[in-house]
């Protein structure tokens, strides 16, 4: 099955601020196959989150150009109801901090039931409002049952009872499970998980990752897991895309990347793994700071920090070099071509 | 389910019943509506005593005598005739035989005695008029229709104050006596023989009166007001809009500016004059610089009286002295503006180089504020600085008792409960009332006291008039007040009251005497 | 929950006792003598003394206070020296009138202020937001009594589409007294005609009184909504396909309503004590004038009644506000 679920081509994202224009994404290409779990890896500010958000067309007030095709359909031209339905039915998203991502003043049952109603039954919004929901009682009851089943599936004990709990009454891991349940309420085709375990303690991380993996497999979904932790991708991903400074540095299967890293940045990342010590914004083994978006380095964006820097690296960005059938990297070590 | 349909049925029935009962409350006849600043606290004749209450009392109760017309004259009302003994102490009044209370029982001598005794017993409101004049036990029934008053001492204006003795129905009051002599009950009860009955009483909001078509005296006009509503309307702009829009037929407490602006517009007119209201500035005669008579003379000569009159837009008139024009006759003002005389008097005073005085007026009274400004300008010319302070009425009154706290200069309106010099002169100039709000300057002069006491006890009109002339001359010589103006009436009447000019009477409690109103349109 | 209510009620009692003492002694320290004013200019010493004894003003101040509080416990609010009538029935008549007006004003403030703030937040920095901003600024800048006069002039005098003054058609009977609030009484007795009439009389004064609350609520809702709309949980809800209408009207509004609730609680007290000017213009027979004239004549018994009742109402509304906090925000728990 050669079918591609998501195909991103030439994605650029610019923000205008007081200091000028920030180019956060600078021509990202990315392909996701059906049934595949893709890990996007990079430092903070590498553009990995923005890439994922653009699939949901959820980028806040920036100028987004390029193309995001979802089953061949352009996402970036969607708006209004079509966009909302697309998000509801095709996508599920899980974010980093479960504490700030759960609405504190609604019970999780309320949130989850709403999610089921919107995503699965596609009911109009007004029927979720205080008066409108009165017209919708039977369906809501049904959705509630399904919500309980979902909670049960994501591993919340005593789910029926927990429906009446509020975010502040749950542990971090439980909150993340609830958020996963909400994301999966409509049986989406794609789950996007942005740093889903970063805010959790180590024991919990493994459980949540396993849960995501299980759910994706059993529901025949695809997933994109965004992380700066290569340990995470190694555990659950099929393929990896390494991003740096708004571009894709290297991509390939897990085996490609771990056993045969090509890009100096990827190599640096891998060196950081054994220590299992990842600091925010900085990776062991790679000196220097991530590049500025306002004034990005000329040429290859990694060249100021690159241990294998060559004299021409700073002149033009490199083109993508094909290493193997599934393996690509953008580095002058493997190609002489400039980026078009 | 059964319960639900049952409650639904009950609701429907309830709704039907209630909506039917709501219909039919409409009364097609439009009452005469008055927008009034003031509230009718009570219409117990032994408690209430002010302009609005007085006007209302006359509608619900009758008195033996009543003021009518302008200038006001005392007319027998429940009385048929009266005689006075030679010593002036015994008044014998024969009652009309046809007068009946609203419940149909006759108004007889016993009712008059009961009312007089009750007034003195309760001791509020108009009781003050009888203080020292009539004591408990002084009123007796000679026979069923004759009543006799034996006074403590002769009192010239006795018939005048009898206009404030309203006759209550003893049977009704006794039946509702409570523990306070019926005061609570009579707050809003119709226990009299007057032409109107109370049909709705919402304190502080509105008061509705319905005419008694079988009033024993009959009605002066065929098209009398069958229903009158007084609506408490505190905001002057609302009262003005009320009369302009025709919502109100009658408004009180209007400023001169409003009266001038509205006069003649759509048949709206101001009340005719002249009034009996006296406006003057009281000077502290005991404490502070104004205790110096020469300084008071200087102030009296320095005051710009023309500028003062301008405050009332030409509608007021200059006072010659302490009495209003209709009582002072053709007397001319003693003090006119003369800065030379003023400086002369100042030089003779203890303050030849001028001084500083405080003028205190009641917050919110614009006329009084302007008076202060004129005074400030006037006195600056002779080196007297005037500071102007506004205080609340109650706070001002609290300062009067002690001459050291009483203000140097204080403006005061004096209306009249009865149209006799005694009403003005006694309250303002007899030393027994020093410190009372009618005499905040603590004025007292033994010669004036003697003259006033003598005049009060005199029955012969000519002798009395002469005594009052002497008293006025003595007061003017002391110059305790700046006698400024008799001010215009503050009532404005709409076109539906067709005869207001003819029935207007300036005595306190007669300006809204709607028994006499003829209603058109 | 029971504990919360009991605690608050106990606190209320303390507040009211403090308030009563403060009002009583401050009102009586002022030298003005209500008896003198009430007795009138011509009263003799004996008559004044009679009044003094009748109203108990000849007793020591502390004894008067104790007696007042004792009477209060028995439901007797005392008698006004100046008005010469009992305070209780007066409060029963005037207070519901003002309460009705204030509640209507707050309702208008919420019903107009919330949508206004909502629109402003949704169309942030665009034309509707600018209009809302100017409108709110205007509303807080305009004195409500001035607007009252203008509204009266336009609606009642020129266009004659609303009644001029008062609470109810003077030729008709108001609905039977249950709460003393005409609109509520009319609804309770299902008298919809009377409800309509009462509403017509109430709308202009209530609107004038609502201005401050309306404008403030609009600005509060806008600011809070913008805050909430920027949170992670709203982005998450958006990402999983919750429609924008639900995001704003349900998911964000409930969070944003907490500050609005505070505002409503504050404005209740503010409007209740500041209604007198508007009441005057529309001749609304409310508590405002009763209180002002009592204060001006140093008639302290009605003043006590008004202060205690108003204080009680404000404390009560604060309890209700706290209670709504509990309902709206599950994170809040009132524990001792």
Image (cartoon, grey):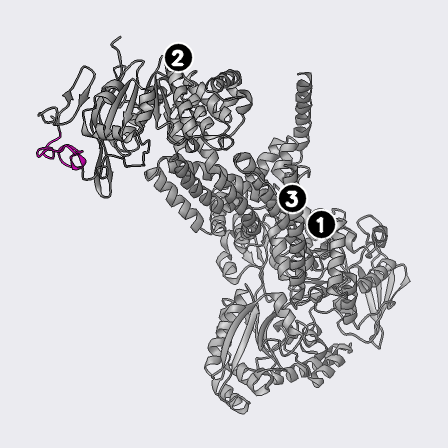
| Residue found 47% across the figure and 36% down from its top | C255
Q: For this view, does B497 lie left or right of residue B10? A: left
Residue extending furthest toward the front: A274
Picture quadrant where residue A201 is located:
top left
Q: Nearer the viewer, mark 1 or mark 3?
A: 3
Give the letter of the chain under mark 1: C
| Residue found 64% across the figure and 30% down from its top | C190
Picture quadrant where residue A85 is located:
top left
Dot 3 falls on a residue whose secondary structure is: helix
Task: Using a 10 Å C-alpha cutoff, classify the residue at mark 2 as few (fewer than 14 neighbours), some (14 to 19) or many (20 or more).
Answer: few
Distance Cα–Cα, label 2 vs label 3? 54 Å
Q: Nearer the viewer, mark 2 or mark 3?
A: 2
Front one among B124 and A236 = A236
Residue A218's mark?
Answer: 2
Q: Is residue A315 magenta?
A: yes
Distance Cα–Cα, label 1 vs label 3? 28 Å
Residue extending furthest toward the bottom: B348
**Between discs 1 and 3, the one toward the N terminus:** 3
Task: Identify the image quadrant of the N terminus of chain B.
Answer: top right
Front one among B34 and A250 = A250
Q: Could you confirm whether marks 2 and 1 are on the same chain?
A: no
Residue A30's mark?
Answer: none
Magenta-highlighted residues: A297-317
Give the letter of the chain under mark 3: C
- Is A69 rendered above or below residue A299? above
Q: Is residue B498 visible?
A: no
Q: For this view, does B212 lie left or right of residue A181? A: right
Residue C7's mark?
Answer: 3
Q: Nearer the viewer, mark 2 or mark 1?
A: 2
According to the picture, the residue beneath numbered tag 1 turns out to be C88
Q: Could you confirm whether marks 1 and 3 are on the same chain?
A: yes
């Amino acid at each position: 099955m050669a079918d591609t679920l998501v195909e991103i081509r030439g994605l650029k994202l610019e923000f205008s601020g007081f200091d000028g224009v920030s180019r956060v994404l600078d021509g990202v290409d990315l392909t996701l196959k059906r049934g595949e779990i893709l890990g996007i890896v990079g430092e903070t500010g590498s553009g990995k989150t923005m890439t994922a958000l653009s699939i949901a067309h959820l980028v806040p007030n920036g100028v987004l150009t390029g193309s995001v095709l979802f089953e061949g359909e352009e996402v970036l031209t969607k708006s209004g109801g079509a966009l909302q339905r697309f998000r509801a039915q095709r996508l599920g998203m899980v974010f980093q901090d479960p504490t700030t991502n759960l609405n504190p003043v609604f019970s999780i049952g309320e949130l989850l039931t709403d999610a089921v109603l919107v995503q699965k039954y596609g009911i109009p919004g007004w029927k979720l409002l205080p008066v409108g929901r009165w017209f919708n009682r039977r369906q809501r009851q049904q959705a509630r049952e399904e919500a309980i089943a979902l909670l049960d599936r994501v591993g919340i004990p005593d789910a029926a009872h927990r429906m009446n709990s509020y975010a502040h009454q749950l542990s971090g891991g439980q909150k993340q499970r609830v958020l996963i349940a909400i994301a999966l309420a409509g049986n989406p085709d794609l789950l996007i998980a942005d740093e889903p375990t970063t805010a959790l303690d180590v024991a919990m991380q493994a459980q949540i990752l396993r849960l995501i993996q299980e759910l994706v497999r059993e529901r025949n979904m695809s997933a994109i897991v965004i992380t700066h932790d290569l340990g995470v991708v190694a555990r659950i991903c099929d393929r990896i895309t390494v991003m740096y400074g708004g571009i894709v540095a290297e991509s390939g299967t897990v085996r490609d990347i771990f056993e045969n890293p090509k890009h100096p940045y990827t190599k640096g990342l891998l060196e950081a793994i054994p220590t299992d010590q990842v600091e925010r914004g900085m990776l062991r083994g790679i000196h220097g700071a991530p590049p500025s978006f306002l004034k990005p380095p000329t040429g290859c964006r990694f060249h100021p920090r690159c241990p294998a820097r060559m004299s021409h690296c700073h002149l033009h960005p490199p083109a993508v070099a094909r290493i193997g059938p599934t393996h690509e990297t953008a580095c002058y070590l493997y190609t002489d071509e400039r980026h078009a | 389910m059964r319960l639900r349909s049952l409650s639904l049925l009950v609701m429907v029935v309830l709704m039907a019943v209630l909506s039917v009962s709501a219909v039919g409350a409409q009364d097609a006849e439009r009452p005469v509506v008055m927008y009034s600043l003031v509230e009718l606290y009570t219409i117990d004749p032994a408690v209430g005593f002010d302009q609005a209450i007085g006007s209302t009392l006359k509608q619900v109760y009758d008195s033996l005598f009543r003021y009518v017309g302008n200038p006001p004259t005392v007319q027998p009302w429940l009385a048929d005739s009266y005689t006075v003994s030679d010593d002036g102490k015994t008044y014998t009044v024969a009652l009309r035989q046809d007068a009946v209370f609203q419940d149909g029982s006759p108004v007889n001598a016993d009712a008059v005695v009961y009312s007089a005794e009750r007034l003195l017993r309760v001791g509020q409101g108009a009781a003050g008029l009888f203080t020292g004049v009539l004591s408990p036990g002084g009123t007796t029934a000679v026979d069923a229709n004759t009543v006799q008053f034996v006074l403590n001492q002769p009192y010239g204006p006795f018939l005048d104050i009898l206009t404030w003795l309203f006759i209550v129905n003893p049977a009704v009051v006794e039946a509702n006596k409570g523990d306070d002599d019926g005061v609570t009950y009579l707050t809003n009860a119709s226990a009299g023989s007057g032409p109107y009955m109370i049909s709705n009483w919402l304190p502080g909001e509105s008061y509705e009166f319905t005419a008694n078509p079988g009033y024993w005296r009959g009605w002066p006009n065929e098209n009398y007001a069958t229903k009158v509503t007084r609506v408490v309307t505190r905001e002057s702009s609302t009262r003005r809009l009320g009369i302009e829009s025709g919502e109100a037929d009658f408004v009180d407490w209007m400023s001169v500016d409003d009266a001038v602006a509205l006069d003649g517009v759509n048949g709206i007119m101001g009340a005719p004059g002249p009034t009996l209201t006296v406006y003057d500035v009281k000077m502290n005669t005991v404490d502070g610089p104004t205790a110096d008579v020469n300084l008071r003379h200087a102030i009296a000569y320095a005051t710009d009286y023309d500028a003062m009159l301008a405050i009332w837009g030409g509608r007021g008139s200059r006072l010659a002295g302490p009495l209003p024009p209709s009582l002072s006759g053709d007397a001319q003002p003693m003090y006119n503006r003369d800065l030379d005389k003023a400086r002369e008097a100042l030089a003779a005073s203890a303050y030849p180089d001028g001084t500083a005085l405080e003028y205190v007026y009641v917050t919110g009274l614009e006329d009084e504020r302007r008076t202060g400004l004129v005074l400030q300008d006037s006195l600056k010319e002779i080196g007297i600085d005037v500071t102007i302070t506004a205080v609340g009425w109650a706070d001002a009154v609290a300062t009067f008792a002690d001459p050291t706290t009483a203000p140097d200069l204080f403006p005061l309106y004096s209306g009249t409960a009865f149209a006799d010099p005694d009403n003005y002169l006694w309250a303002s100039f007899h030393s027994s009332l020093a410190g009372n709000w009618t005499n905040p300057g603590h004025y007292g002069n033994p010669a004036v006291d003697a003259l006033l006491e003598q005049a009060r006890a005199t029955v012969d009109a000519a002798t009395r008039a002469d005594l009052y002339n002497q008293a006025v001359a003595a007061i003017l010589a002391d110059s305790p007040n700046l006698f400024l103006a008799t001010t215009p009436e503050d009532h404005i009447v709409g076109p539906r009251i067709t005869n207001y000019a003819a029935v207007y009477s300036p005595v306190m409690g007669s300006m809204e005497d709607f028994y006499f109103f003829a209603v058109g349109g | 929950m029971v504990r919360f209510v009991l605690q608050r009620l106990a606190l209320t009692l303390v507040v009211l006792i403090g308030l009563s003492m403060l009002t009583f002694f401050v009102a009586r320290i002022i030298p003005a003598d209500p008896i003198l004013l009430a007795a009138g200019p011509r009263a003799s010493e004996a008559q004044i003394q009679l009044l003094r004894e009748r109203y108990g003003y000849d007793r020591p101040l502390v004894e008067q206070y104790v007696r007042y509080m004792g009477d209060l416990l028995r439901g007797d609010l005392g008698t006004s020296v100046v008005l010469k009538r009992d305070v209780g029935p007066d409060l029963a008549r005037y207070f519901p009138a003002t309460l009705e007006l204030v509640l209507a004003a707050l309702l208008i403030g919420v019903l107009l202020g919330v949508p206004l703030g909502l629109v402003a937040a949704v169309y942030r920095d665009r034309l509707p937001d600018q209009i809302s901003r100017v409108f709110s600024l205007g509303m807080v800048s305009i004195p409500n009594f001035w607007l009252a006069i203008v509204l009266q002039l336009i609606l009642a005098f020129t266009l004659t589409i609303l009644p001029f003054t008062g609470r109810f058609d003077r030729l008709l009977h108001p609905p039977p007294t249950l709460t003393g609030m005409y609109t509520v009484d009319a609804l309770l007795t299902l008298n919809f005609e009377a409800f309509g009439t009462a509403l017509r009389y109430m709308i202009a004064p209530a609107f004038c009184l609502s201005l401050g609350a309306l404008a403030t609520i609009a600005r509060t809702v806008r600011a809070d909504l913008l805050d909430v709309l920027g949170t992670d949980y709203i982005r998450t809800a958006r990402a999983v396909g919750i429609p924008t209408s639900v995001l704003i009207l349900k998911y964000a509004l409930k969070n944003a309503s907490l500050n609005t609730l505070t505002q409503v609680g504050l404005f209740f007290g503010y409007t209740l004590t500041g209604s007198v000017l508007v009441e005057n213009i529309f001749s609304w027979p409310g508590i405002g004038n009763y209180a002002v004239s009592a204060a001006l004549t140093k008639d302290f018994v009605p003043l006590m009644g008004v202060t205690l009742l108003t204080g009680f109402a404000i404390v009560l509304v604060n309890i209700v506000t706290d209670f709504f906090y509990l309902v709206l925000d599950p994170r809040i728990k009132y524990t001792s």
